[in-house]
Amino acid sequence: VRSAGKMWPISIYKLLIFSVFSLGGGCAVRYTADWSSLDARPLPKWYDEAKVGIFVHWGVFSIPGFGQYSEWFWYWWRGQKLPENVQFMQKNYPPGFQYADFASQFNPEFFDPESWAEVFQASGARYVVFTAKHHDGFTNWPSATSFNWNSVDVGPHRDLVGDLVAAVRKRSLRMGIYHSLFEWFHPLYMLDKSSGFKTQSFVATKTLPELVDLVTTYKPDLIWSDGDWEAPDTYWNSTQFLAWLYNDSPVKDEVITNDRWGRGCSCRHGGYYNCADRFTPTTLPNHKWEKCQNVDTRSWGYRRNMKLNEVMDLPSVIADMVYVVALGGNYLLNIGPMADGAIAPVFEERLRGLGAWLGVNGEAIYGSSPWRSQTENNTVTVWYTTKNNTVYAILLGWPDKNVLELLAPKTSASTRVTLLGHQGPLSWSPIDKAGGLFVLLPELPQSPSQVWTIKLDGVK
């Protein structure tokens, strides 16, 4: 709890010490600042029931909007000196131009948080996660620890986080905040790093004050932590922060966190598990997890040189989401708005297409659980979910001759089979006494999603 021989700022120090050592009143569970206690906290139910969220990467990096993983532009240019990025700057910007100079060009005249929120709601998502600060350190809110490197002092001259939080909550969506623990080129972080992370100057004066400010100001439903991997959680004082978050913060009962709280924490500690970007397990995990997936497969931030064949099509988005939910995960689908605040039409089309599919098939997704058999691939690829004793077989294709063969379900005299979005029951017959059934599907026009849901009542 000391930084290079100096005490932390007193307000943060008192806040976290109070959380760790106070006994509290009544019978409320209190968590101590260690992983065995923090990991035992049950996840608030809203998160597992929500299933689908929208991730938004937006900031100063959206101005150059160039290259693979454009949100890392500064690092590729100045840290790694990648030829592609160096040549881009030499060709398009004058000598001496600095990354900080992009901030004054960040004037999002088309940013309409109400419009964004309407698109997010139309996508069928139940929560949104927005980049409050990425690894370049620019804060999309008026952070007191980021003087002249925040969205109120320079560029937009508005509280982007606050404006979006208000608009999203008007739509009754949950609001999450992405926050990078580290900053590539912050002098205090670089000093701490050079000491082997034996000092904590950056944590004491930057990271923890920012996190507490975000929580107390915006009261997020979810904190999506990142930028943790270079240092252990003891450097970040992650357990102390989380103990305060779960015990004494204004969001202690409903807040969700991920697993990026220090080197070695991913897939081991925290709330739900991200494990890695685009985490893709092949079997049912034993812990709640989330897959974050970018619609532009080459970047989280917007790329001005994005090509259509690099963008996930609608069937791919829906199939990926279905697979994730069938294996017990949540699906966080990312878009990168343009620097001017507009959402690219191709991204909007994907989100609205996802929402249209969920409008018909959402009962198989929201609030569902993995079934005893998660998938089969006999006639076509099928993923299963279940809810309230109903089983849903979600088809990633249409079978030849309109006959679907399902091997996993065991039918009964009360079995009823329907197709979501289609009126009336479907004809079916058992395969044998051990289980399985043939389903006769109706003639249907081609679906933009190429994904359909069979509802099975009265099966085991």
Image (spheres, rainbow, N blue to C red):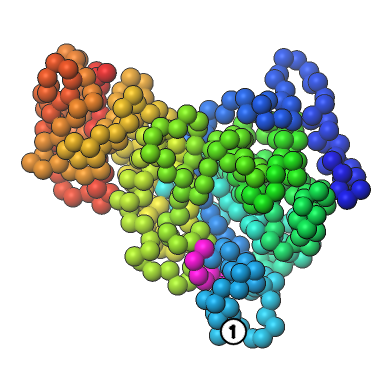
Quarter in which the N terminus is drawn: top right
Residue 184 coordinates in the image, percent (x, y)? 68, 61
The secondary structure type at the circle numbered 1 is: helix
In this orientation, does residue 267 appear?
Answer: yes
Q: What residue is shown with label 1?
A: 90
Q: Name the amino acid, label 1.
A: Gln
Residue 270 painted magenta: no
Tell how many labels.
1
Q: Residue at x 45, y 72 (%)?
A: 305
Residue 257 coordinates in the image, percent (x, y)? 61, 38
Residue 65 painted magenta: yes
Q: Residue at x 77, y 50 (%)?
A: 197
Name the quadrant containing residue 33. top right
Q: Give left or right: position of 207 versus 99.
A: right
Quick one: which residue is furthest to the front in this view?
196
Q: Residue at x 36, y 50 (%)?
A: 317
Magenta region: 63-69
Q: Nearer the viewer, residue 408 or 199?
A: 199
Residue 435 coordinates in the image, percent (x, y)? 18, 20
Q: Nearer the viewer, residue 314 or 75?
A: 75
Name the quadrant containing residue 29. top right
Quick one: which residue is furthest to the left in this view?
401
